[in-house]
Image: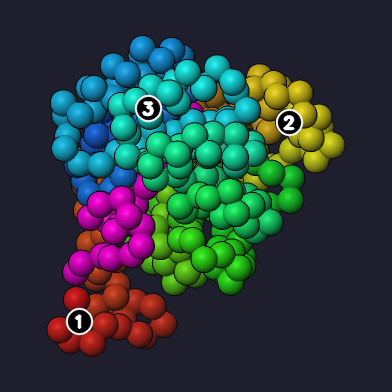
Amino acid sequence: MKWETRITEMMGVQYPIVEGAMAGLGTVDLAVAVSEAGGLGMITAWMLKTPENLRKAIHKARSLTDKPFAVNFSPTMDKSLLPMLDVAIEEKVAIIETAGSRSNDFGEKIKNAGLIWLHKAYTVKHALKCEQDGADAVVMMGVEGAGLKNPTMLTTLVTIPMAVQKLKIPIIAAGGIGDARTFLGALALGAEAVTMGSVFCAVKECQLADHRKQVLVDADPYDPRWRNPILATPDMAALQKVVESESTKDLLKAAGKAEDFGIPKEAGTGAISLAIGFINEIMTTKQLVDTIMGDAEEILATGGIGGWKLAPGVK
């Protein structure tokens, strides 16, 4: 089956799957593995610290794959990322994702360079502003997701169709997506791709230690130690003060980090969503993507969605 959406066409990828930025786990090796598996790999600029490190990372990625990959800049209020953005533009990285603050902080520069610009949004109002500012697509995250949060955000199930009603640009769904059914569910809601992060934390190419990956395999999303911090959102007044001060350190604190809420430290990462419920084993990135896409095709062909299935011969 050929998976074609505006996102796959825009980015030149086989599957409508985008790797999440994943905080400190968005390495070159993982990004390359995702791209080679048919999705869009994502290098996280913030974890590389310097423009030269980012340049080296981009060169390494290109030496390992000829498939498209992206670079994430988050939070966009961090002005130390501006020289790194210049590097990404100089290196003509085709796809750049921004997140964490105002959509136009980096957007104009990216668009003027003729590159594809994605921005992560948390509400429909925010997404509409991204569209107005010229974003090529928005990543809409529900409260089930990981990372920076907005005090007023809703669930993925509600956010995506509301955004689809209002926006003309394509939407990439994020938040709690980690298997074939959540993947298909996001597309049924109107998204044209999904962003997954948590399930990539447990693949073999992720730099997280094996014993920490096993913690994710064993994690129970019903356990309050996981559920409560994942679903927590920051206080609106406190977050607004931080945004106005343009302090990255304060933003991360206000938005809530894993250790602030008590996510088990054994996990070794705060980049965790309720998609931990779909992490059942440690496998390679290709095995994970192939499993999700294979299961999705099987579901469509055998009536796995309310008895509806593809007609014979439909591709």
Q: Amino acid at mark 2?
A: Val
Q: Which residue lies most toward the right here?
A: 237
| Residue beneath disc 2 | 243
Residue at the image point whose x is 22% and y is 49% from the top: 38
Amino acid residing under circle 3? Ala
Q: Residues within 10 Å of mark 1 (few under 14, many from 20)?
A: few
Amino acid identity at mark 1: Val
Q: CA distance from mark 3 to mark 2?
A: 25 Å
Residue marked by disc 3? 88
Percent x, y of residue 104: 60, 40
Q: Is residue 47 left or right of residue 232?
A: left
Q: Is residue 115 above or below residue 122?
A: above
Residue occupied by mark 1: 314
**Circle 3 — which element?**
helix
User: Does residue 304 show up?
Assistant: yes
Measured Cα–Cα span from mark 3 to mark 1: 40 Å
Magenta region: which residues? 1-27
Q: Is 65 on the left-hand or right-hand side of 164? A: left
Quadrant (top left, top right, bottom left, bottom right) of the N terminus = bottom left
Asked if the residues shown at circle 3 and circle 2 are in contact, with their CB atoms under 8 angstroms apart, the answer is: no
User: What is the secondary structure assignment of the residue under circle 2?
Assistant: helix
Tag in front: 3 or 1:
3
The quarter in which the C terminus is drawn is bottom left
Residue 14, how many percent across, how many down? 23, 55
